[in-house]
Amino acid sequence: MARYPSYKPSPKLAPRRGGRFLLTLVLILIPYLVINAAVFFFMTTKPEYEVILGDTNDYVTTSFVIKVKSAFPYKSLTASMDGEPIELTKLSAKSFGADVTRNGVLEFSMINFNGMPAASYEQISILDDNPPTLSDQVIEDGVLTIYLEDSQSGIDESSIYAVSAAGATRRPLTIDKETGELTFSMDPDGLTIHAKDRAGNEVVATCTPQPAAAATGLEQAAEAPPDVQPTGTDES
């Protein structure tokens, strides 16, 4: 009777316990890690936005635009200046803007759909909210010479005038636009000078000659410099 060799499976085809365990580990662990990483990403993602500050043409008003960069929805987007809320205007689906009429610190705040916040601050300092300055007052031969300066919007020459103690209005004798020198016919009882810059800020200065010192013998004391007390007002 013929004898046939017994069948033995090839070692390469025999199932391995280690391979089955590794396959199970891959099929369970990788999805678990991916899902948890995705959950962590969604729960910790912060909102993204960009703030663009505008320029100014009149030194009275400027503007800003907020562009939303986040791909995810957000709960809120707010802006304020020095603690006062600013109403935003929707410019497009992902951009908002507003006008600003004074200098200060802008604060922006955005809250993502997952509650994660983001905030930023911007300084506005290009607007002219200070009045012009008056300096170097001299009285000589009944003429008051004074210098007017404004470093931002510039002087509005048409706004310059003086009022005498009797209430009469006087226009400058001369105005030098290059140096800011003004001259007025001086009133013995003093003058109140008014001037504005192009942003509407006004300076008011009272110029009063100080009494001359008492004469000694035939010598007369020299004329004392005027006493000027400036005050500024903001009409912007």
Image: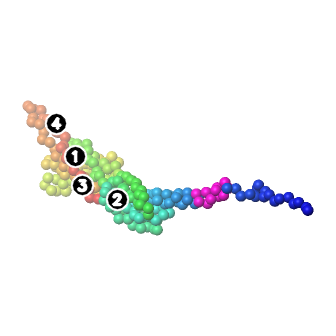
Q: Secondary structure at mark 4?
A: loop
Q: Please rate how many residues cluster around mark 4, counting C-alpha atoms within 10 Å: few if below 14, some from 14 to 19, many from 20.
A: few
- Residue flagged by tag 4: what amino acid is it? Ala
Indicate whether residue 183 is drawn in magenta. Answer: no
Task: Point out the frontmost of discs 1 and 2.
Answer: 2
Asked if labels 4 and 2 touch by Cβ distance under 8 angstroms, the answer is no
Q: Going from the N terminus, do you reach mark 3 or mark 4 first?
A: 4
Identified at 40% across, 64% down, the residue is: 76
Q: Secondary structure at mark 3?
A: strand
| Label 2 vs 4, first from the N-terminus | 2
**Quadrant in which residue 106 is drawn:** bottom left
**Color encoding of the figure:** rainbow
Residue tagged 4:
222
> In the image, which disc is placed on residue 80?
2
Tell me if mark 2 has few (under 14), some (14-19) or many (20+) residues whose alpha carbon lies within 10 angstroms of its own.
Answer: some
Q: CA distance from mark 4 to mark 1?
A: 16 Å
Question: Which residue is labeled 3 in the image?
Answer: 233
Q: Which residues are magenta?
A: 18-29
Q: In the image, is residue 28 part of the stretch drawn in magenta?
A: yes
Could you tell me which secondary element the residue under label 2 belongs to?
Answer: strand
